[in-house]
Image (cartoon, rainbow, N blue to C red):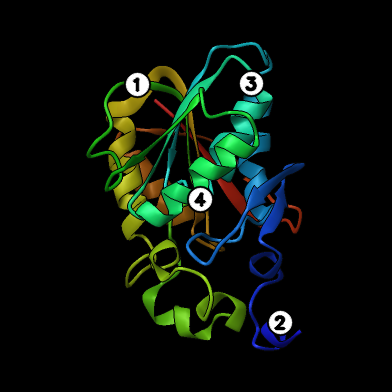
């Protein structure tokens, strides 16, 4: 009760959070997985009907591993890599992979975006930091006081990490692959412009349960 009165998120207090029907370990080193991000999983499932496909999946900024591991759970023949700059977050993701019985199909790598990544992937997902630096102080205490700012701060305009993600896609997205990128509220036009300028195609935008444009689908 004292920790909750101090506005610590419930998921951190109990150490678990459900995401897409699975239970994930949560610590102060990772973002609390949110239902909004399930929109990315749903977008991938709509595009890839064959659940037996041996997909190669890349998760940029994996955090708890919730995106990558949920997709590996849905696609039993898939394998993937989750990258993150935070070694503490990677430790949490590895524990979640073990807890879900997926360590043999999930690899986790410390990297600044794709600097340490090689190869092409059928599916790339990312929930990058997208809060403008000046807006972070105004977020709910549960977020600003207890969640890692590394996973929140998107720079002065909130787009710094989108620039890095979009730049990474051209070299790592397979010819017929898809990328699903989470959007902050109102960021769809700016992110679309970055994608088109890099030679990518905006293949669709999916809304979350509140009707917010939450997930952008990109292809070659």
Quadrant for residue 51, please give it: top right
Q: CA distance from mark 1 to mark 2?
A: 44 Å
Q: Quadrant of the C terminus?
A: top left
Q: Which mark is residue 77?
A: none
* Residue at mark 3 to residue at mark 1: CA–CA distance: 18 Å
Indicate whether 54 appears above or below 59: above
How many residues crowd mark 4 within 10 Å: few (<14), some (14–19), many (20+)? many
List the residue tagged with mark 4: 92
Mark 1 or mark 4: which comes first in sequence? 4
- Percent coordinates x, y for residue 183 in the rendering: 52, 54
Residue drawn where x is 52% and y is 81% of the image: 145
Residue located at (28% from left, 39% from top) = 114
Decide which of tag 2 and tag 3 comes sooner along the chain: 2
Mark linked to residue 4: 2
Q: Is residue 204 visible?
A: no
Q: Is residue 162 above or below residue 195?
A: below
- What residue would you read off at disc 3? 75
Q: Is residue 72 left or right of residue 155?
A: right
Q: Secondary structure at mark 4?
A: helix
Q: Position of residue 64 (x, y in %)?
A: 53, 50
Q: Nearer the viewer, mark 3 or mark 1?
A: 3
């Amino acid at each position: 009760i004292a920790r909750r009165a101090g506005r610590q998120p419930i998921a951190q207090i109990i150490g678990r959070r459900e995401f897409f029907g699975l239970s994930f370990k949560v610590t102060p080193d990772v973002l609390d997985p949110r239902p909004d991000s399930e929109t990315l999983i749903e977008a991938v499932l709509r595009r890839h009907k064959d659940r037996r496909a041996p997909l190669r999946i890349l998760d940029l900024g994996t955090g708890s591993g919730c995106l990558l591991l949920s997709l590996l759970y849905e696609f039993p023949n898939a394998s993937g890599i989750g990258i993150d700059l935070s070694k503490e977050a990677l430790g949490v993701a590895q524990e979640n992979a073990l807890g879900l019985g997926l360590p043999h199909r999930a690899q986790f790598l410390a990297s600044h975006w794709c600097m340490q990544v090689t190869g092409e992937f059928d599916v790339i997902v990312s929930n990058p930091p997208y809060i403008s630096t000046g807006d972070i102080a105004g977020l709910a205490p549960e977020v600003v006081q207890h969640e890692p700012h590394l996973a929140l701060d998107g720079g002065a305009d909130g787009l710094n990490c989108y620039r890095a993600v979009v730049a990474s896609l051209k070299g790592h997205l397979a010819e017929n692959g898809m990328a699903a990128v989470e959007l902050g509220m109102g960021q769809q036009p700016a992110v679309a412009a970055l994608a088109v300028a890099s030679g990518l195609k905006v293949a669709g935008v999916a809304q979350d349960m509140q009707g917010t444009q939450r997930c952008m689908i990109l292809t070659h």
